[in-house]
Image: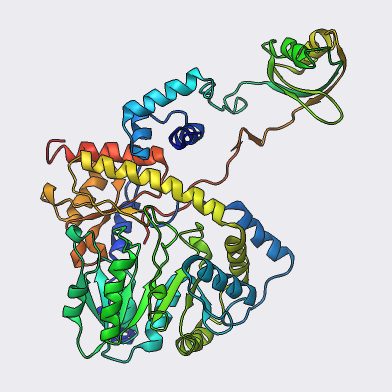
Amino acid sequence: MNELRKKILEILERNSRASTREIALMLNVEEKEVIRLIEEMEKEKIILGYNTLINWEKAGEDSVTAMIDVKVVPQRDVGFDEVAERIYRFPEVKSVYLMSGGYDLSVVIEGKTLKEVARFVAEKLATLENVQSTMTHFVLKKYKQAGIVFEDKEEDRRQVVSP
Amino acid sequence: MNAAEFISPVLKEIPPSGIRKFFDLVMGTEGVISLGVGEPDFVTPWSIREACFDALKRGYTMYTSNRGLVELRQEISSYLARRYGVVYSPEDQVLVTIGASEAVDLALRAVLSPGDEVLIPEPCYVSYKPCAVLAGGKPVMVRTLAEDQFKLRPEQLEEKITPKTKVLIISYPNNPTGATMNREELLKIAQVVERHNLLVISDEIYSELTYNGAHTCFASLPGMQERTLLINGFSKAFAMTGWRIGYVAGNRELIGAMVKIHQYTILCAPVTGQMAALEALRNGFEEVKKMVEQYDQRRRLVVSRLREMGLDCFEPKGAFYVFPSIRSTGLSSEEFCERLLREEQVAVVPGNAFGESGEGHIRISYAASIQEISEALDRMERFLRRFHRV
């Protein structure tokens, strides 16, 4: 990968709000070039979106997250892909990973209440053709997600002016 | 009792640090964005902190050898050899100190006799001059200029040399200017040093923080290892300011003399900090690389924006400071900083805190997040519009 593209990605990964002007100054290139490369990477689906990581609990919104281990029967030709697609199309599903080890798919689900998540698993997920079994783990507390610590205690403790 | 009578007359001559003076003013102002800090905005990398916890758990709570943990000295020695090609024996040529600051103090105290002159290029870190005075020496400031990119020129140096000159203190990359000197430029300084039989105290605390091209270690120049006390530490590179671990490497007699003072005053650097430093040298360089890359990006942002605002600003090649000229505003450095603080709540440090030749400049530290830097620069731009069209 082009070094400049990589640097832009690193900056955006740290802060998706960094402006193209700022990025251009930081990398010592023309702003036009930054805009062009970002557009290019959006088209190539290297940049998939600009999400904000929110601590909803702190924002006063209750939500329940569950991680579900799913065992499935792989299908001829398409393997796990077809059943994975059927699962990830549900809006409740936040992520789906194909796993090695004791089960096949790891599905992360978010709902408003425990009941809502339970109903989703029982009625929609478990009843899918080719789904053999599910094991649901509810998340009790989030400490870190997407590389970011939720209650980061490392505030700036430096004095305002120092040698 | 009149306490003032008891205070040493030497100390009375030494003014408090200019930074400290400005600090009091800053503390009384609310909502300040600070670009006045001379320390990394990163917290010490986790593996280093973890090594300290582990050391405590394993009962590392005792004195170490006066010279520092043997393993740490070995690691320092192999780092200096690997990185700069200078070889020191860990047994008697390396001393672990309480930060690089203690090393500077020890070096001066170990070699100066009353009246000996110490050449100090200026603008410079605030401690060199007072430390020279406290050690009984006579500081002789050598003015470096913005138009020379704050590099030390051999002619300037030579002009100031007298039969009493004994020591030259250099520090590149430099605080507050961010200036660096390359090998060719330092070789010319080395010739002067050799010709006049000087000892060099080379404070290389910012050596890992260089942006274009490699750092030249003064001791690595031909014939210079014997006449150089190489000082470095962990504060800046590994974001370990509060741990207070530094070191000095050099000629064994000189190190031996420094050990004497160190053992009667400090005994030894704290063991937990030394254990952390050990981890830093063994596994910390990936983190250093990441931090340097971020400083570099911020540096470019700051320099470009200052220039857009119409401030004359030489591009620093090391450390994490820029030192633009504010002469175009017609204000003195102190006036500029006080007004910027009052009117826009941005703290930067007046250039004259680093010696008279810093007058007309301000020191901006970019050891802050991009968001803070951007906001502070926006405010500064607004402030500058009052003086000239931006």
For the N terminus of chain B, give its image quadrant. Answer: bottom left
Considering depth in this image, is B143 or A101 the residue closer to the camera?
A: A101
Q: Point out residue B169 in the picture as x, y percentages from the top left corner.
A: 32, 75
The residue lying at 30 percent from left, 59 percent from top is B179
Locate the C terminus of chain B and report the quarter of the image it occupies.
top left
Q: Residue B324 versus residue A155: which sits nearer the camera?
A: B324
Total marks in image: 0
Residue A53's place in the image compared with B27, above or below, is: above
- Where is residue A47? Give x, y as percent: 52, 24
Q: What sort of colour scheme is used for the picture?
A: rainbow
* Left or right: where B121 falls relative to B250: left
**Hey, which quadrant is residue B123 in on the image?**
bottom left
Give the quarter of the image for residue B39: bottom left
Residue at x-position 41% and y-position 75%? B219
Residue B33 visible in the shown view: no
Q: Residue at 72%, 12% (x, y): give it.
A: A85
Q: Nearer the viewer, residue A122 or A103?
A: A103
> Picture coordinates of residue A104 (x, y %)?
82, 23
Q: Position of residue B171 (x, y in %)?
A: 34, 68
Q: Quadrant of residue A139 in the image? A: top right
Q: Is residue A156 above or below residue A6?
A: below
| Left/right of residue B157 with respect to residue B84 in the rendered view | left
Identify the residue at horizontal 52%, vertical 82% (top origin): B93
Please say whether residue B72 is visible from this viewpoint: yes
